Image (spheres, rainbow, N blue to C red):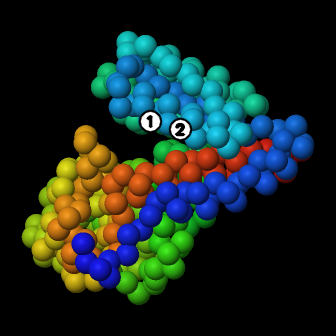
Amino acid sequence: MSAETLILDGNRVADAMKASLSNRIKNLSDQGIVPCLATVLVGDDPASATYVRMKGNACKRLGIQSIRVVLPEHTTTEELIAAINKLNDDNSVHGILLQHPVPKHIDERAAFEAIHIDKDVDGVTTLGFAQNAFGFAEFPSCTPAAIMAILDYYEIPVEGKHAVVIGRSPILGKPVSMMLLNKNATVTTCHSKTANLADIVRLGDIVVAAVGKPRFVQGDWLKPGAIVLDAGYNPGNIGDVDYDACWEVASAITPVPAGVGPVTIATLLKHTVDAAENIANKR
């Protein structure tokens, strides 16, 4: 490790975010409102079940109610949408999260679109995506929002910087590209068809790895002093960047685990509290 490399500690950022929610949750409680997040899990994928359990535990520690809806593997798209609509109609539920991925026979996009925009705390609907592009999304996708929260917490300047995002998924690569652009970065979004990828990454002052391949980004791909945000999580607690190689070159880097992940969960909790406050303000 370079002695000068700053480790961007996601646990530290997440703890600060959660501490700021405590009084807001108490104020809601005084009004008879308990923020409530409903998570929907289809099938028995062990990793997805673990993620849902982690989110439920995080809710419990903060005093947020967590409802878990578990549907069998053979659930149809229509049945899943019906379950989501039931949550849409439940006034005690403030946020809905459909755990990704769903079984292949389900139309995942149709299921995401069924989530009401006021409860889309994970930023998965096309309307939420569009609002994010225009810079006024109330609930932007949680992992991109977590990346921006880390940059804000550590006071890392974005304006005027060249940001290279590796990955173009609709809930990570694309929205974080737009969020960086809205902060006046110059953004290059790379993907599986990008030619000369390493040469392009080497231009980045800020590099976001969101490709889903373990240790994909190499140290010699980086401009010396680059800021590296690893949004990947692969089996074995391995990110999308070759951490040991990259921290020798970067000026700041997120670890995996304890980097972007904890801040993503904290962002989900914040969005759930935001949604509950919106309900309270409409009374």
Q: Residue at x 89, y 43 (%)?
A: 30
Horizontal side of residue 158 vs 85, given as left or right:
left
In the image, residue 133 sits, relative to residue 163, either above or below, namely: above
Disc 2 residue crowd, few under 14, some 14–19, many 20+, Cα 10 Å? some
Is there any visible trace of residue 94 in the rendered image? no
Mark 1 and mark 2: Cα distance apart in space: 6 Å
114 and 58: which is toward the camera: 58
154 and 176: which is toward the camera: 154
Q: Residue at x 38, y 12 (%)?
A: 74
Horizontal side of residue 256 vs 90, given as left or right:
left
Q: What quarter of the picture does the N terminus occupy? A: bottom left
Dividing the picture into quarters, in which one does residue 21 lie? bottom right
265 and 41: which is toward the camera: 265
Check whether the beta carbons of the residues at disc 1 and disc 2 lie within 8 A of each other: yes
Q: What percent of the width, then of the height, locates residue 17?
A: 62, 59
Q: Amino acid at mark 1?
A: Tyr
Q: What percent of the width, then of the height, locates residue 6?
A: 37, 75
Is there any visible trace of residue 74 in the rendered image? yes
Q: What percent of the width, then of the height, locates residue 80?
A: 49, 21
Total marks drawn?
2
Query: Tag 2, which secondary structure?
Result: helix
Taking the view exactly as shown, the residue that stands out farthest to the left is 196
Q: Residue at x 48, y 52 (%)?
A: 262
Q: Amino acid at mark 2?
A: Lys
Q: Which residue is mark 2?
A: 55
Q: What percent of the width, then of the height, locates residue 197?
A: 14, 68
Horizontal side of residue 214 vs 7, given as left or right:
left
Taking the view exactly as shown, the residue that stands out farthest to the bottom is 160
Residue 113 tag number: none
Residue 51 tag number: 1
Dividing the picture into quarters, in which one does residue 207 lie? bottom left
Q: Residue at x 57, y 25 (%)?
A: 68
